[in-house]
Image (spheres, rainbow, N blue to C red):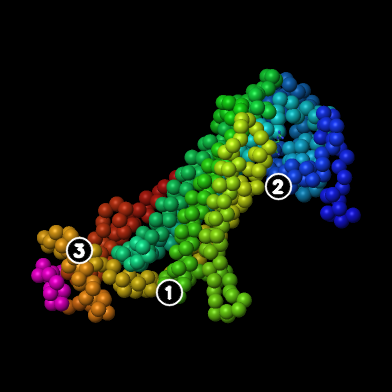
Amino acid sequence: MNKKQKNMKKITKKWSPRFSEPANNKVQRYTASVNFDKRLAIFDIEGSLAHAEMLKKQKIISAADLRLIKKGLNQVRKEIIAQKFKWSIEQEDVHLNIENRLTQIIGISGKKLHTGRSRNDQVATDMRLYLRDVVDNTIDQIKSLQKVTLSLADNHIMTIMPGLTHLQVAQPISFAHHLHAYCEMLERDKLRFQEARKRINVLPLGAAALAGTSYPIDRKFVAKLLKFESVMDNSLDAVSDRDFLIEFNANASLLMTHLSRWSEELIMWSSPFFEYVEISDSFCTGSSIMPQKKNPDVPELVRGKTGRVNGHLVNLLTLMKAQPLAYNKDNQEDKEPTFDVADTISDTLDIFREMVSKLTVFPENMEAAAIKGYSTATDLADYLVKKGMPFREAHGVVAKVVKFAINQKCDLSDFKLKDLQKFSKLILKDVFDSLDLKGSIESRKHIGATGFNSIKKALKKSRIKLSK
Ligand code: ARG
């Protein structure tokens, strides 16, 4: 019998004595979640251990039962870690697979574990435990990327590049300033995940199916064991809430959006049209037909995978929008998107960090691009304003100067003083300080500006935040 035939094997077992016939084979496959929710296994066991501990404390089960349940669940965990556990589609999901195996190992005590509990509050607990873990890792990974970005910025405070608006040369900026912008985006991402963690870290267990249970349970005790901050205050909400998954996905979408924007820049910067940077060979691939090609696959895929993460967000929002209270089986569909989002952001953050740490920067090319684009035109206008001309008038004068320079195919700083004076008598020798890229940057001294000292202070502030 091959694998497919085995899966097609006729099901003979009924779901429970309440049913008069076994589930249709196709239905069983359609409704089972074990193939994907088995990755919740360690969290499911952790939750069950805490639940059993509480049942014993409340004298709902005996000390002997608890001892056996602990022993049995530990063995199940070992089997799962050693990949010896036999997952069965007939047992539908991770919860029933584990409970069933527990009962095989320890007998009747295993059947007592589910007292005062439902899979509805169980799965909600598992997902929260899982996601709390994911969020903690995500926060660490964001910090690592910030660290690498700050180190690169430290080395490029004096590297000058053209700042762009509308993808046109606007004003000269420090490359460190540009990198710091991404560091700020990541800072907000980190704060968003930290904030979301508070809403993840609330215990649903005890809600049972939807209405709570008649057993004298102690939910706060379970919360303490599982390191949840508090317990959910409404049992209907506890089993049906998936806001925390949507919030996580929304935060992941924003994070990916930031990395996607950065990727777009890396793709452009590494093209022969820019040549600002070179992405290390180990992050690129070649072309099967064009031998000269080196393609920036990693940033392209980061950009591409952003669509995938955003898609999952719409998936989850749509999943929830028409669900009546309380639990509905629809919720089983929350897992695959969530797992995929978690895997995607983890892989992306990891690979992105390494790519940034191995980036080669070509400061001369960046500076040459800044010179080419009349990026100090605003500085010339500001110079005239400081000499007494109203800004709007100065704007017009400089526009004429730029037009002339374009016709002459030269840069503003190439002009002789007497050429410039043809446009305004206010222009004196000191004008050349303003036409210089460095001077332009240096003159922007306030908080948040690109001035070399301002950016040094900003990097320092970011580093202090990171060390907290
Ligand atoms: N596998 C289910 C899920 O992921 C577990 C909860 C099942 N509850 C139920 N009442 N059928 O949502």
Measuring from the top left, give residue 131's x and y in whole percent: 60, 42
Determine whether, in the image, residue 268 is placed left or right of residue 432.
right
Highlighted magenta segment, given as a residue range: 417-430
Write down the residue under mark 1.
273
| In this view, 429 is above or below 25 | below
The Cα–Cα distance between marks 3 and 2, rounded to whole angstroms, is 62 Å
Identify the element where label 2 is drawn: helix
Is residue 174 visible from the viewing direction of this image? no
Write down the residue under mark 2.
36
Q: Earlier in the sequence, mark 3 or mark 1?
A: 1
Dot 1 alpha-carbon crowd within 10 angstroms: few under 14, some 14 to 19, many 20 or more: few
Q: Check residue 422 for magenta coloring.
A: yes
Measuring from the top left, give residue 51's x and y in whole percent: 69, 29
At a point 19% along the width and 65% down the height, the residue shown is: 396
Q: Quadrant of residue 381?
A: bottom left
The Cα–Cα distance between marks 3 and 1, rounded to whole angstroms, is 30 Å
The amino acid at mark 2 is Phe
